[in-house]
Amino acid sequence: MRYPIPDLPAGEWQTNELEVEKSRFIGWVCHAPDIAAFETMLRAAREHHPAASHHCSAFIAGPPGEQSAIGFSDDGEPGGTAGRPMYQVLEGSGLGQVGCVIIRYFGGTKLGTGGLARAYAQTVTQALEALPRRDIVERTSLRLRVDFSGEAQARGWLDEREVPVEAADYTADGVWLTVGWPSDIEVDLSPLASRLRGNLELLADD
C-alpha cells in the first residue's frame, strides 16, 4: 500500500491561523506514525498556549482507512463541533500518519454549532493545503538466497526496482538478502531467477 504522509521531522509541525468573529483558530499538523507522536504535539500545544479556550484534536496514526489508531476530541466545545469535523477532513484527505490540534482563543462572539464546525474544518483544510507531503510504501520482508557470485547482480536488479536490501547474512554456501518488497506489487522474481540461472531461493519472513 502506498499513501501520502506529512513530510515533517519528528517534533516539528505545520502551523496556520484562521480568525472568525474575533476568535482565533491556530492549527498545528504533524507526522503521527504512532499515537505517541501525536500526543507529543498535543502536550506542546497546551504548553505553548496555556491560556487558550480549547485544544481540540484529531489524528490517524496509521494508513488511510485505519480503524483502531484514530481519535478526536472536542476539548470542551459542544459535542460534535470540533474533533469530528477535524477528523472528517483528515479522513477525506487521503493522508495517513497525520495528527492535528487546533488551539482556539475565544473572541467574545458565539459562533453556534454550525459555525464552530465550519471554522474547525476550515482551519484543518487550510493547514493541509500547505502541508509538505511524501509517499510511504508499506513493505513485506522477504529473504532471498543467492550464490556469492550472484550477489552483485541481485543487488543491481533490486536497486533498479527500488527494493531496499535491509540486511545481508553470509553463510558457507551463499548470501541471504533480507529485502523490503512493496506490498502493493506482486512478488515476481522470475526475471532475477533467469538472470541468476536458477540460483535463487525465496523464503517469506514470518
Image: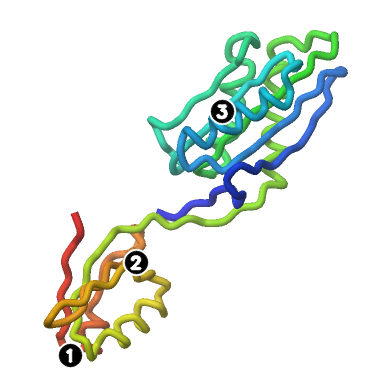
Disc 3: which residue: 58
| Few, some or many residues within 10 Å of mark 2 (<14, 14–19, 20+) | few
Mark whose residue sits in front, 2 or 3: 2
Q: Earlier in the sequence, mark 1 or mark 2?
A: 2
Instruction: Please name the amino acid that badge 1 sits on.
Output: Arg
Farthest residue, direction right: 22
Front in this rendered view, residue 154 or 135:
154
Residue drawn at x 65%, y 11% as measured from the top left = 77
Q: Earlier in the sequence, mark 1 or mark 3?
A: 3
Mark 1 in CB contact with mark 2 (< 8 angstroms) = no
SS for dot 2: strand
- Could you tell me the amino acid type at mark 3? Ala
Which corner quadrant of the image does residue 87 belong to?
Answer: top right
Say few, some or many: other residues with alpha carbon within 10 Å of mark 1 (under 14 / 14 to 19 / 20 or more).
few
Residue 130 in percent (x, y) is at 72, 47
User: Circle 3 sits in a helix, a strand or a loop, which is it?
Assistant: strand
Asked if residue 93 is positioned above or below residue 56 in the image, the reply reads: below
Q: Distance between the residues labelled 2 and 3?
A: 34 Å
Residue assigned mark 2: 166
Q: Is residue 90 left or right of residue 105?
A: left
Tell me the quarter of the picture where residue 186 sits. Answer: bottom left
* Residue visible at 73% across and 13% down in the picture: 53
> Relative to residue 113, is residue 150 depicted above or below?
below
Horizontally, residue 82 falls left or right of residue 138, namely right
**Amino acid tagged 2:** Glu
Instruction: Give the colour scheme of this rendering.
Output: rainbow
Kindly report the distance in space between the C-alpha atoms of the residues bearing marks 1 and 2. 24 Å
User: In the image, residue 63 lies at what x, y percent?
Assistant: 44, 43
Task: Read off the residue under disc 1.
Answer: 197
- Please provide percent x and percent y for residue 129: 70, 45
User: Residue 54: where, in percent of width, then height?
Assistant: 69, 16
